[in-house]
Image: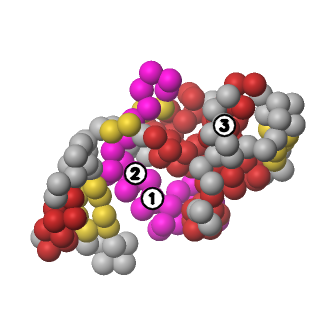
């Protein structure tokens, strides 16, 4: 209740829709404010791509060719040109640490939307969608995914550890 009150205070006067889910994995305590509200996923879709790369056991040394389509999503973070390549490992690093859209598009294309959608269902993410028509999620869905990663239960303990290490290097 105290945390909910503090969140309410911090968000007082914020214009727009807000959805928050916070949880201490050690104690299990937390707070949720409009946690199941479906919101635009923005860069949170990259967490689904990250999970799906590890779930598919995509070799980290596999090469991804930068396509015109992927290059079209660049917001100034990609210094490479069409036809050049990145390894899956390099693309994951760029996608997570600097939120590189082109890397996310290349990885998502390699994995495929059907597989990512199956993973969303298997994870029990009720308000998360991955398609051109609907790219949404909720705070509780992202909490569920991040809790699995944090506890070592996302794909495997080693995959979860790799995901945590990538997430900790965000810039």
Quarter holding the N terminus is bottom left
Which image quarter: residue 126? top left
Q: Which residues are magenta?
A: 131-159
Q: Distance between the Cα atoms at labels 3 and 2?
A: 24 Å
- 42 or 119, which is in the foreground? 42
Nearer the camera: disc 3 or disc 1: 3
Is 111 displayed left or right of 20 in the figure? right
**Picture disc at residue 146:** 1
Which image quarter: residue 101? top right
Residue 160 is at least partly visible in this image:
no
Q: Distance between the Cα atoms at labels 3 and 1?
A: 26 Å
**Picture disc at residue 142:** 2
Q: Secondary structure at mark 2?
A: helix
Of pointers 3 and 2, the one earlier in the residue sequence: 3
Residue 127 is at least partly visible in this image:
yes
- 41 or 165, which is in the foreground? 41
Q: Are marks 3 and 1 in contact (CB under 8 Å)?
A: no
Residue situated furthest right in the rendering: 84
């Amino acid at each position: 209740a105290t945390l909910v009150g503090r969140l309410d205070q911090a968000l007082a006067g914020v214009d727009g829709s807000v959805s928050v889910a916070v949880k201490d994995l050690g104690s299990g305590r937390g707070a949720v404010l409009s946690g199941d509200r479906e919101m635009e996923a923005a860069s949170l879709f990259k967490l689904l791509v990250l999970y799906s790369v590890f779930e598919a056991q995509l070799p980290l040394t596999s090469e991804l060719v930068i396509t015109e389509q992927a290059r079209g999503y660049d917001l100034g973070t990609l210094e490479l040109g069409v036809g050049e390549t990145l390894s899956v490992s390099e693309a994951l690093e760029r996608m997570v640490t600097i939120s590189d859209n082109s890397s996310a598009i290349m990885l998502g294309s390699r994995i495929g939307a059907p597989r990512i959608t199956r993973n969303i269902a298997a994870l029990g993410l009720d308000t998360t969608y991955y398609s051109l028509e609907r790219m949404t999620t909720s705070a509780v869905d992202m909490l569920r995914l991040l809790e699995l990663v944090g506890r070592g239960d996302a794909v495997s303990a080693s995959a979860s550890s790799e995901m945590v290490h990538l997430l900790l290097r965000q810039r």
